[in-house]
Amino acid sequence: MPNDIENQTEQPTSARALRNSLKQIQANDTHMRTYLNLGQQLFEHGWDVNTASTLLRSLCTLLSAQHTLLAIENSGKLVVFCQLGQTLPIGARIPMMGVLAMMLKNPVRFTLYENKNTQLWTHGDIQHHECLIPIALGQHGKGIIGLSGKKLTLDTAEVETLQALAGLIGLAISQHLGPVRSEIDQSILETLTPREREIFALLPSGLSNNALGEKLGIAPGTAKIHVERILNKLGVKDRTQAAVKAVELGYKS
């Protein structure tokens, strides 16, 4: 009699363990397919909007997200490169302030940022769950992946998959935009604040302080102060030398 009771107890436990094991195997297989599919897309087509869109659709399916975007760092701001759902439109420029600046502060550490109330979404749903993932290569920030959904919850395996994908995307972005900057070049850029980097990127255009202020929505005097700080940090004498350095680092008019 005791043996019968013991067997009845063990059978449900074993069945539950088997189901959990099968679910884990299926989840791991799905994660691996997502990673391999991105590699195949990059091999066949390179990094472009179609490759990014395919990845975002896969992430929505994998993680039960309704809205997602991928934004790339450019001249001290994040520019929306690809999106699905109700997010900021492609081409929108997002100031790197608050959590966004913290996420991409070098050296970047891979951390999942949740529910930071960023202005990336246009759905107006206060019950959504937000997840932000930094994209980096060699701990140098390249951009972010943003995900939003009511049922969006990530386990350890899913976070590890996102980390691997973020590294692969960082490499693809670097190759697409040009050679990875040297350590010396990168150290120069790291001394600049996001606003200074934005002004630095505009120097090859030959804009005056008044024009810089008008373009960026700041006072001409403030633009002048930023330019002076840039010259000091770069160790150059004038705006022309700073503009030449900006071109050398890939910033063009």
Image (cartoon, rainbow, N blue to C red):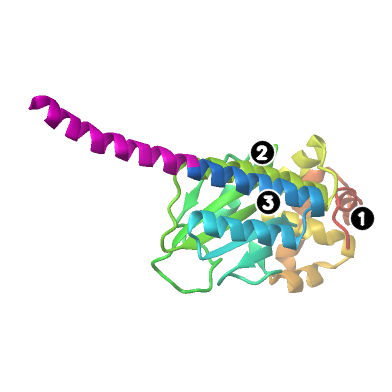
**What residue lies at 57% left-to-right and 50% top-to-bottom?**
133
The numbered mark, 2 or 1, whose residue comes first in the sequence reads 2
> Which residues, given as a range, are shown in magenta?
1-25
Residue 54: x %, y % from top left: 67, 59
**What residue lies at 61% left-to-right and 46% top-to-bottom?**
33
Residue 9: x %, y % from top left: 18, 34
Q: Answer left or right for 198 relative to 85.
A: right
Q: Nearer the viewer, mark 2 or mark 3?
A: 2
Residue 2: x %, y % from top left: 9, 26
**Front residue (pair 133, 207):** 133
Q: Nearer the viewer, mark 3 or mark 1?
A: 3
Q: Answer left or right for 139 relative to 235.
A: left
Q: Which residue is mark 2?
A: 139
CA neighbours of label 3 inside 10 A, class few (<14), some (14 to 19), many (20+): some
Above or below: residue 208 compared with residue 225: below
Tags 2 and 3 in contact by the CB under 8 Å rule?
Answer: no
Q: CA distance from mark 2 to mark 1?
A: 31 Å
